[in-house]
Amino acid sequence: MRFFRRCLVGIFLVSLTVALLSVGGHTIYGSLQERWARESVSRPARERVFSVNVVELEPATVTPILTSFGEVRSRRTLFLRAPVGGTVVELSPDFVEGGAVREGQLLARIDPADAQTAVDVARTDLIEAEADLIDTRNALGLAGDDLIAAQEQLALRDRALQRQRDLKTRGVGTEASVETAELAEASAKQAVLSRRQAIQQAEAQFNQTQTLIDRRHINLTNAERLLADTEVFAAFDGRLSGVTTAQGGLVANNEQLAELIDPDALEVSFRVSTAQYARLIDEEGTLSTAPVTVTLDVLGTDLSFQGRVTRESAAVSEGTTGRLLFAELDDTRGLRPGDFVTVAIEEPVLERVAVIPSTAVDAAGAVLVLSEGDRLENGKVTVLRRQGDNVIVRARALRGREVVAERSQLLGAGIKVKPLRGEREIPQAPAMVELDQERREKLIAFVEANSRIPKETKARMLGRLTEPQVPAEMVERLESRMGS
């Protein structure tokens, strides 16, 4: 019991000692901090220097490129419609979606039975009218002969009347004989009048028959036209699209059968803003025939086509802005109407301008210029165009000076910098990957089975896929469309 009590006393004394030591140490540390705070030690500040990329404002002649998006369309399109209604009894083997047809080729024939019957009836009516015309012509001739005979008879009666009058004057003839001759003369005159009336009736009948023949000719021509309308021919060489009928189908009058497109007469329609349009016209307001480059992205392979701007839309459609322009292409192999393409238009040349990164200019057109002692100062440029990550500027007062390529909030006028020249990032070549045999075969099979890829592009892609190294971008796009 005594031992236990002594242990407790010892532990208490040790704890008390530790507590007193802690209080003393804390007091000493607080005194030192207070002394250090009262001491004023001035340390010299060192200026911070930033490393920046700089580019030189060297005037040059630049051709700005205006980029837009457009759609390929055909300048030559024909809607094939059924001129008459009926049953389709014959179709060309090429009358299918995407079928290639030649000019003048028979594409479809609608049942011509009713139209042929109408032609036969019209031809028979014409023959009948021509026969009637012959009869009326003969009747007119006979009426003319009757008139001549009646006129001769009148002349005889007139001479007989003169003889009777002479006889009566000499006292030989009688009054009854004179009256009988006068009555005969009047009867002859009446006969001549009747013959003239018959000729007039014959002439009227002849004219009516001639008019009837003209009408029957018109009816025959119309019937032959309707018979010809039962056949649909290709107006020019092209391809069929939107085929909606089949052999044996019933079509209505003016129903659309298909659409004939000329694949060699393609153009691109694209829209630009009003400000961009103003840069493409000359001083007289005429649209310039600026060169264009049309790019079509086909599974990682870009197809490029050259052309020129040809015309603009006559009016601005409701709900749209800017201007709709059209460009004619020189070579259209691989393009199809409806393709969505990228259009790059060459604007008029700009002289004595510089191309710098867009990160070097703020919204107000201010730049940071490198001055003496590698310190920065403010400068001003005029932004003319924006070309992707670059801008085209004009700054005659800063000619030959160096500007900061990438502005930041840490940089400003008077700050000392360390200029880095010629250390701009260099565009790297496309990444290439090596494919194992199984993966390569899957990609080749997918490209060969895709019927939407043009033959020239498909051959180019298959050639790239057989190489030891294939562009990674092409592989990624193909596999994304394969669903892997």
Image: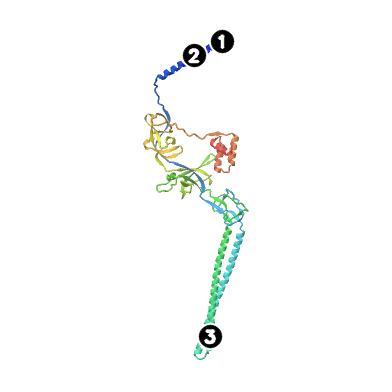
Say whether residue 372 is left or right of residue 440: left
| Residue sitting nearer the eye, 375 or 267 | 375
Q: Residues within 10 Å of mark 3 (few under 14, many from 20)?
A: many
Q: Secondary structure at mark 2?
A: helix
Q: Quadrant of the N terminus?
A: top right
Q: Earlier in the sequence, mark 3 or mark 1?
A: 1
| Residue sitting nearer the eye, 440 or 475 | 475
Q: Residues within 10 Å of mark 2 (few under 14, many from 20)?
A: few
| Depicted 20 relative to depicted 373: above or below | above
Res. 54 image quadrant: top left
Spot the residue most to the top.
Answer: 2
Residue 286 place in picture, x, y as percent: 42, 48
Residue 52 place in picture, x, y as percent: 43, 30
Q: Secondary structure at mark 1?
A: helix
| Residue type at the position of mark 1 | Cys
- Report the Cα–Cα distance between label 3 and label 1: 197 Å
Mark 1 — residue?
A: 7
Q: Which mark is residue 181?
A: 3
Mark 2 — residue?
A: 20
| Residue type at the position of mark 2 | Leu
Q: Are marks 3 and 1 in contact (CB under 8 Å)?
A: no
Residue 19 place in picture, x, y as percent: 50, 14
Q: Quadrant of the C terminus?
A: top right
